[in-house]
Structure formats: structure tokens, C-alpha cells
Image: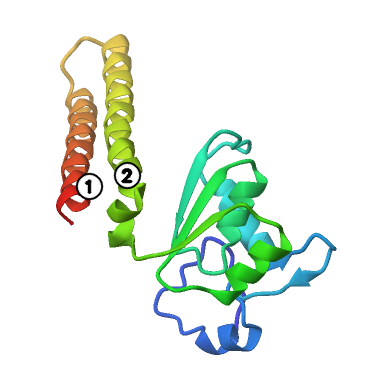
């Protein structure tokens, strides 16, 4: 099977045979220097992690890994200092093995995404949805201030930039409504 970089999509590709042969979805470098070679190579996993818009230092921050599988992202975020909760709908033996091997403190929960409200994590999603509105509103204000700074003349591109920013705020507000309804009324 051909190798993949982090940018190549695999949707529609059947990799079940290779996954079955390797027994691991993620690769791991263990504390003793040995490597478990999974379907996704370490360099690909590290490249994906480094492309995420999150800081390298995560001390004092919390991470929720939904669909953790073998847990590579969970353990990598923990390595960067995060307090991590990992959820999956089934218990994965490989996750438990790595958890023990690394003496990890990742909070591993077996539940479905829609059980989050009952687990207390639904509140975090509710708060995050409101914070997203504030972030998008700040970005929209920055776009509007920049457009006004460049020129006060009416221009179709200036109007378009402001309209797109306003639409982003509206979408984030719709997200709040959906998240809150799902959490509260599931």
C-alpha cells in the first residue's frame, strides 16, 4: 500500500488489511526508545500535530480528544503539558497499553459523543461555543477596522469583507444554539 503524507486524504480507501496486520492505527515511540509501528507513521502524526493551531506549551490547558482510538493525540497533548480527557465509544486495548506504559494521567472515558452532557463535558462544550462567538466577533471587528483604516470610500470588496465577517459571527451564534440544544435536550 502506498504511503501517505499528512496532506493526502484517505477517504474511501480501505486500509483494514494493513491495520489488521500492524494491529495499531497510530505509531508510538516508547520511553525505552523502542517504536510501535502503526498504520500512521510517527513523522506523519508529528506533522499533523504541528499543523494544529495550538501552542506548543499546553500547561494549565485542557484538551478533549474525541474518538481517541490508540490515543496518540491524547498522549502527545499530555506530553506538551495539557490536562487531557480522551473519549471513545469502545475501550481500545492499545490505548490502555500505552496509558500504562507511559504512566499517563489522561482521563480515558468510554462513552459516545452524545453522552457528553451526562459526563459533565457538555458544559465545557457550551462554554467553548460562547467563547467561539467572542473570538469570531473580535476577528470581525479587526476586519472592519482594517477596511475602514484603508479607505472610507464605499467599495464592493470592502462591503464583501464586512459581510463575510458578519456572516461568520452569525454562524458562530447558530453554533451556540445547536450546541446548547444538543447538550440540554440531547
The residue positioned farthest toward the right in the image shown = 32
Question: Dividing the picture into quarters, in which one does residue 6 lie?
Answer: bottom right
Rendered residue at 51%/83% (across/down): 15
Residue 150 position (above or below residue 36): above
Would you say 78 lies left or right of 8 here? right
| Residue of label 2 | 125
Would you say 64 lies left or right of 168 here? right
Q: Which dot marks residue 179?
A: 1
Residue 181 placement (x, y as % from top left) = 15, 48
Rendered residue at 68%/64% (across/down): 100
Residue 87 placement (x, y as % from top left) = 44, 61
Question: Dividing the picture into quarters, in which one does residue 60 lie?
Answer: top right
**Image quarter (top left, top right, bottom left or bottom right) of the C terminus:** bottom left
Would you say 113 lies left or right of 34 here? left
Mark 1 neighbour density, 10 Å: few (under 14) some (14–19) many (20 or more): many
Check disc 1 and report its element: helix, strand or loop: helix
Residue 112 position (above or below residue 123): below
Check disc 2 and report its element: helix, strand or loop: helix
Instruction: Find out whether the residues at labels 2 and 1 contact each other: C-beta distance under 8 Å.
Output: yes
Residue 78 placement (x, y as % from top left) = 62, 48
Rendered residue at 61%/35% (across/down): 59
Rendered residue at 27%/33% (across/down): 130
Residue 69 position (above or below residue 53): below
Q: Is residue 38 visible?
A: yes
Q: Which dot marks residue 54?
A: none
Question: Dividing the picture into quarters, in which one does residue 43 lie?
Answer: bottom right
CA separation in Å, label 2 and label 1: 7 Å
In front: 8, or 41? 41
In front: 20, or 114? 114
**Image quarter (top left, top right, bottom left or bottom right) of the N terminus:** bottom right
Amino acid at each position: 500500500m502506498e504511503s501517505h503524507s499528512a496532506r493526502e486524504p484517505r477517504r474511501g480507501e480501505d486500509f483494514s488489511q494493513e491495520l489488521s496486520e500492524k494491529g495499531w492505527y497510530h505509531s508510538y515511540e516508547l520511553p525505552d526508545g523502542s517504536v510501535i509501528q502503526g498504520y500512521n507513521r510517527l513523522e506523519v502524526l508529528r506533522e499533523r500535530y504541528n499543523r494544529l493551531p495550538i501552542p506548543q506549551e499546553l500547561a494549565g490547558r485542557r484538551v478533549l480528544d474525541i474518538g481517541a482510538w490508540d490515543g496518540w493525540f491524547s498522549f502527545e497533548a499530555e506530553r506538551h503539558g495539557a490536562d487531557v480527557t480522551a473519549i471513545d465509544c469502545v475501550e481500545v486495548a492499545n490505548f490502555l497499553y500505552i496509558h500504562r506504559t507511559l504512566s499517563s494521567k489522561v482521563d480515558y472515558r468510554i462513552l459516545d459523543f452524545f453522552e457528553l452532557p451526562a459526563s459533565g463535558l457538555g458544559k465545557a462544550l457550551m462554554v467553548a461555543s460562547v467563547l467561539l462567538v467572542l473570538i469570531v466577533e473580535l476577528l470581525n471587528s479587526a476586519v472592519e477596522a482594517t477596511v475602514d483604516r484603508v479607505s472610507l470610500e464605499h467599495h464592493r470588496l470592502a462591503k464583501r469583507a464586512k459581510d463575510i465577517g458578519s456572516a461568520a459571527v452569525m454562524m458562530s451564534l447558530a453554533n451556540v444554539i445547536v450546541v446548547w440544544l444538543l447538550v440540554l435536550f440531547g
